[in-house]
Image (cartoon, grey):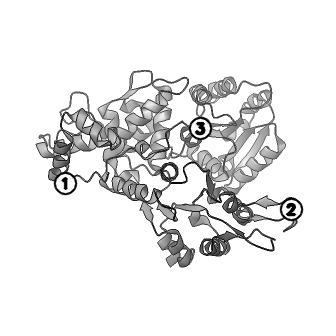
Amino acid sequence: MADQEQRLLMLIDDEPAQSRLVSALAAREGWRTVIARDSETAIATLGTRQGMQLSAIILDQWVPGDDACALIAELKSRRPALPILMLTASTSPLLAVEAMRAGATDYLVKPVAPDRLMHALRSATTREAPRDELAPLTEKMPSNPDFESMIGAAPNFRKALAVAAKAARGHGPVLIEGDTGSGKEMLIRAMHAASPRAKSPLRIVNVGGLPANSIESTLFGHEKGAFPGAFDRQIGALQHCDGATLALDEIDRLPLSVQERLLESIRKSDVRPIGARHSFRIDARLIAASNLPLQDLVSEGHFLPELLEALSPTKVSLPPLRERIGDIPALARFFLARIGEQPGLRELGITDGALSLLAAYDWPGNVRQLQAVLFRAAVFCDGDALTSEDFPQLLNILGSGLVPATGNPMQESAGVMLYTPDGNLRPLDEIEADVIRLAIGLYRGRMTEVARRLGIGRSTLYRKLSELGIDNAA
């Protein structure tokens, strides 16, 4: 009985269809949902016996007659510890900032994927660090879809970019593997921008976000009357991308039956819609992305070995952020500059203590998570620079002992550690190598700019790269 009481959700929403959907999704994970159609009912519910048992609130911004941020503030004033998630169709950073400052725990942009909604609810009601919070919003921040926007100097990361840049100039399939949030979609867009098909459309289909019964129709299309509910003819993504580029994200979640059809289309360069009597010739450039190593799925019998071979004449492996911790200072400064351009926010610096804290975390959500965590910290920062105190959840997980105290000689300088753990200075060649790596990441691999900023010639820079064993992979 206690478990049920701890899993009570209040949904403030006046749309019956959405209310039923959210309630059904929440029920799968043991939540019982109470629905309030307006703010008066929601506030009144808080004072009831049932309201005292609430564990979370989900608020739709468009509840008639209500100012969402004012309602959030009122709810938080009455129940400060209660997590509040706001659903909205708006991608405005200003609204996100206002909602978070009013007390919202998370900000979800509609249409929101069921997995994303449940993850946000789970994260808000457990002690785990925020993983993908604000991801839909931060991903919509304007950015240049090119390789120079891919920040990092770690050798494994630069190598992945070099392989992708070379593959971008061709027309064959490419497979990109990497953990969730490691930058696969950004790399897809950079490859398309550098490809011979850059002036043609790029269409990205997230397989994991599609209902299982619509995946085949989404990719291949269908004829009118091909199956119950097929009231109109639909052109599939493969046919839509004739002469263009189709990216299939989370291809590791493609059902085996659809894998067989996709393999046939790749081999024959054609597509046959469901219910059609004949096929259509296509010339679509295919880029596949997977969160899991497909070879492991082949070994387990969940992925066709022939399809893996067809998809991966070129394979790009993006390293997780925990394997490129040295890139965090450059990434943090880059993201803070972009965040500072958003309405309601300003550009902030970041202290060495904060960078040390960020470097100590293992970032299961990778670069996407880092960006979202920085966004949240920037929203609530009153100073001119983020400090370790602006990341309370990370401090709670890692402990303040990992953060250098002010005046401590082990403190970082511009993201480069000057001292060894025992307090002695590091060797000069190690410091010099770190400075060069930092510069390569900060100036996005533009070696002429790196040399200019370091005050040396390009030939000297390349000589130092060789002497210090730094692979810039540019």
Judge whether residue 129 can be spotted in this image: no
Q: Where is residue 8, by image quadrant?
A: top right
- Name the amino acid type tagged 3: Asp
Q: Give the mark nearest the N terminus, 2 or 1.
A: 2
- Name the amino acid type tagged 1: Gly
Q: Secondary structure at mark 2?
A: loop
In the image, is 218 to the left or to the right of 427?
right
Q: Nearer the viewer, residue 249 or 50?
A: 249
Residue 405, given in percent of the width and then of the height, sits at 26, 31
Judge whether residue 351 can be spotted in this image: yes
For marks 2 and 3, give the CA distance: 36 Å
Q: Nearer the viewer, residue 115 or 408?
A: 115
- Name the amino acid type tagged 2: Gly
165 up-or-down from 144: above or below: below
Crowd band around label 2 with a 10 angstrom C-alpha radius: few (<14), some (14–19), many (20+): few
In the image, is 165 to the left or to the right of 73?
left
For marks 3 and 1, give the CA distance: 44 Å
Q: Nearer the viewer, residue 62 or 51?
A: 62
Which-is-in-front pick, marks 2 and 1?
1
Q: Give the mark nearest the N terminus, 3 or 1.
A: 3
Crowd band around label 1 with a 10 angstrom C-alpha radius: few (<14), some (14–19), many (20+): few
Q: Secondary structure at mark 3?
A: strand
Residue wearing tag 3: 106
Q: Which mark is residue 469?
A: 1
In the image, is 59 to the left or to the right of 173?
right
Residue wearing tag 2: 229
Q: Give the mark nearest the N terminus, 2 or 3.
A: 3
For marks 2 and 1, give the CA distance: 61 Å
Residue 312, given in percent of the width and then of the height, sits at 48, 69
Which-is-in-front pick, marks 2 and 3?
2
Which-is-in-front pick, marks 3 and 1?
1
